[in-house]
Amino acid sequence: MLKLENVSKSYNKGKIKAVDNVNIHVKPGEIFGFLGPNGAGKTTTIKMIVGLLKPDEGKIYIKNVDNQKEPLKAKKLISYVPDNPKVYERLTGIEYLNFMADMYGISKEIRNKRIREYLKVFELEDAVGDLIKSYSHGMKQKIVLIGALLNDPELFILDEPMVGLDPKSSFKLKEIMRKRCEKGKSVFFSTHVLEVAEKLCNRIAIINKGKIIAQGTMEELKGQFMNEESLENIFLELTEQ
Ligand SMILES: Nc1ncnc2c1ncn2[C@@H]1O[C@H](COP(=O)(O)OP(=O)(O)OP(=O)(O)O)[C@@H](O)[C@H]1O
């Protein structure tokens, strides 16, 4: 579903190596957690996957589509929720959702069904006619999530999705992630919340100083780190070296 091959990216004319020869493979039907301390290179990696940044080296494939060679074809397969969603504040919720559906060329019938369904899930039905600038931070996050789900993406990519969501919304999002994966679709998300990653993810990669320092299922990681019981211990041992 998603393959990163020897991907690297530097900032400031090579002075900061944000992502260093990263290899990641996400399979269909997987929830994949991308973990790492602050400044490890998570957002830079995600921005390269979604086509907002160009890798200095390496290749990224989404369902075997090279995201540099065929960017539009690759973008049709994904949806992206950034860590700090900037929404068009002068649109109403429903105008924004229709705009997103137009961008992906979704028919009226399908979009109306999906919009109704997700507005109900995230309890935004009453606010959808109001301007987004009147929304709380959590409501803005939820409208962006709904917008990103409208194209029913093969690969759903989220940067720190749980931050700012209340426990109920966070629970609903996790349910949506699980259901998508049951249908053979995939989710790739970064998080600092290790308990969420441990419970939710089929596989995990840990990045530190731009390099992947561990990748596998929880069982595989526990096998590698025999003395460590929890993901938190493994994470701390690896990232404090
Ligand atoms: N636009 C930029 N210009 C220069 N350096 C940058 C830029 N964006 C990120 N960096 C640097 O690249 C490295 C990786 O940053 P990145 O934002 O990818 O990490 P992150 O793992 O997402 O961090 P966090 O968990 O704090 O969001 C850091 O050293 C950061 O300071």
Image (cartoon, grey):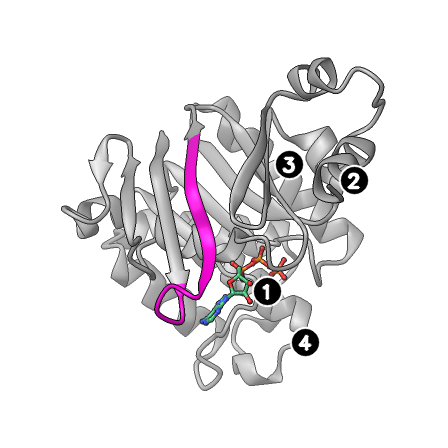
Residue ID for mark 3: 175
In this picture, residue 239 sits left or right of residue 117: right
Position of residue 211 in the picture relative to residue 162 (left or right): left
User: In the rendered structure, which amino acid carries the disc numbered 3?
Assistant: Glu
Q: Secondary structure at mark 2?
A: helix
Q: Residues within 10 Å of mark 4 (few under 14, many from 20)?
A: few
Foreground mark, 3 or 2? 2
Quarter location, residue 27: top left
The dot on residue 141 is 1
Sequence-wise, the earlier of marks 3 and 2 is: 3
Q: CA distance from mark 4 to mark 3?
A: 23 Å
Residue under label 2, please give it. Answer: 236
Label 2 vs label 1, nearer the camera: 2
* First in sequence: mark 4 vs mark 3: 4
Q: Residue at left 74%, top 46%?
A: 193
Q: Position of residue 162 (x, y in %)?
A: 68, 53
Query: Gap in Å between the C-alphas at discs 3 and 1?
Result: 17 Å
Label 3 CB less than 8 angstroms from ligand 1: no
Residue of label 4: 136
Question: Do the CB atoms of the residues marked 3 and 2 lie less than 8 Å apart?
Answer: no
Q: CA distance from mark 2 to mark 4?
A: 34 Å
Query: What is the three-letter code of the residue carrying label 4?
Result: Ser
Q: Can residue 151 be seen here?
A: no
- Name the one closer to the observer, 223 or 177: 223
Whether residue 74 is in magenta: the answer is no
Is 20 contained in the magenta span?
yes
Indicate the position of residue 2 as horizontal and vertical percent values: 37, 33
Residues drawn in magenta: 11-24
Q: Earlier in the sequence, mark 2 or mark 1?
A: 1
> Is the residue at mark 4 in contact range of ligand 1, meaning its CB lies under 8 Å from it?
no
Q: Is residue 31 left or right of residue 186?
A: right
Q: Secondary structure at mark 4?
A: loop
